[in-house]
Image (cartoon, helix red, strand yellow):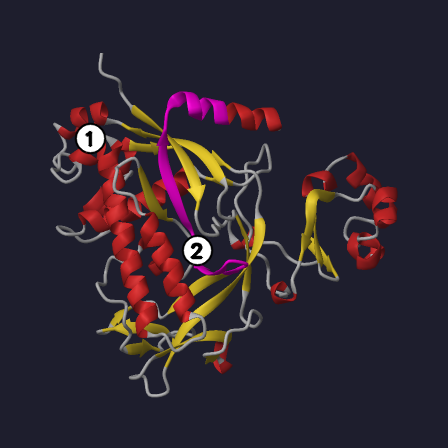
Amino acid sequence: MEQLNKKYYLNIEVLTPLNIGVGAENDWVENVDFVINGKILYKFNLRALMSDFGKVISDKVGTKGMLSAIGINNLTNPKYAKLFKLPLDVDGKVAMQPNNQNSNPIKAFIKNNLSGKPIIAGSSLKGAIRSVLFDYFQVKRQGEDAVFGSAKKGDDFMRFVKVTDAEFEKTSLVNTKIFNLSSENRRDWEGGWKHKGGKFSETDQKFKSTGFNTIYECIEPQQCGFAAIMLSPLAYNNYGKTNQHIADNDKEPIVTKNISFLFDIINKHTKNYLQKEKKFFQTYNEAEYADEIEESIDDLLRLIPSDGKSCILKMSAGSGFHSITGDWQFNDYSINGLDTSRSVSRGLFNNRKSAKSRKLADTDDGLKLMGFVKLSLIDEDEYKQNILSKFEKD
């Protein structure tokens, strides 16, 4: 009997700092979610705050006035913490370099509600794959509903692709800076680093880690998680017979062929995106460290496999729509105009909106594009062994 789903097991390796946001309302706010004493950031264990000894603190000083009553110096004093069983994370002390200090909220990473560990949600991974397929199908159609159908009508193509969550061990804080194009005459554009936004925006060629920088909670490179992806060829074939939208010669092999077919599509998309990004930094190379960014892109290009057993996928964090989708609209990322109709100006290419900025992770290994992962096939035994070992550690 033919199985409903073809299940593939994946090792997910993070290649460049990865942030998957959980919404601005959950970002870390200083003196609410964390405090900084000297160069040490202390992240509160909010679960502990809700526990029995959290009640002890609130009974003594009142929950609302807890931080002001205790004071930052006492809060980070080991003796005081012991006396009040202060709810600091075991790994909550994070060394803050001078270039990381910033009054802006820290962009939080999505967590498993049960374990508290960071996860790449299956929906996030599926969404990244969907963006690649949107580009792949765009040759014939325009608009998302025309390409994928809709859940409301019951003809959503992505219903035949299912992805599980992948859990990782830990996160770190990563500083980011914006590489931005500027022009005095809106004709001759130059690359630079943005140090101030708003009405008095400031961009120049000199790199400095502070000024208009954002700190992200990230999974850093070399960490691995494990997930499964399921394709449903039987359901596709049965449904496609009665639905013209689903019965499509471009869509059919995505679901019915081996997953290496999908991996090849992803690799071609990523290669094309990275080559255009490299040309962008070559064209606007006036900024300090532009050459270094080109080299880091070359490193990613060399990692793109050709055996069909793995793929390199761009996920999130960078510069909005451009970063997440790979900007399938353009074959050239040049800028030749500026849209100033909104409070935040946006680049134009031939009068169409195009990103004029990039967000780079400022790491010990240099400046990196964010959000690249490698998906590799593993067998079921290896998958189960790795999942089991995670439970044993917990």
Residue positioned most to the top: 1
Q: Is residue 365 magenta?
A: yes
Alpha carbon distance from label 1 to label 2 = 31 Å
Tell me where residue 332 appears, x and y as whole percent. 23, 66
Q: In this rendering, does residue 165 appear at all?
A: no
**Which residue type carries mark 2?**
Met
Q: Residues within 10 Å of mark 2 (few under 14, many from 20)?
A: many
> Vertical placement of 381 versus 254: above or below?
above
**Which residue type carries mark 1?**
Lys
Instruction: Answer with the quarter of the image where residue 164 lies.
Output: top left
Q: Residue at x 23, y 63 (%)?
A: 330
Q: Residue at x 19, y 29 (%)?
A: 256
The residue stretch that appears in magenta? 362-386
Q: Residues within 10 Å of mark 1 (few under 14, many from 20)?
A: few
Q: Which residue is mark 1?
A: 257
> Vertical placement of 189 versus 310: above or below?
below
Instruction: Answer with the quarter of the image where residue 86 lies.
Output: top right
User: Where does the N terminus fall, quadrant-wise?
Assistant: top left
Looking at the image, residue 21 sits to the left or right of residue 299; the answer is: right
Q: Label 2's element?
A: loop
Q: Which of 218/347 is in front?
A: 218
Task: Check contact, mark 1 vs mark 2: CB within 8 A.
Answer: no
Label of residue 370 in the image: 2
Tell me where residue 187 appears, x and y as whole percent. 29, 84
Instruction: Answer with the quarter of the image where residue 71 lies.
Output: bottom right
Q: Which of 149/186 is in front?
A: 186
Looking at the image, residue 6 sits to the left or right of residue 42; the answer is: left
Looking at the image, residue 2 sits to the left or right of residue 33; the answer is: left
Q: Which of 355/99 is in front?
A: 99
Label of residue 271 in the image: none
Q: Is residue 321 magenta?
A: no
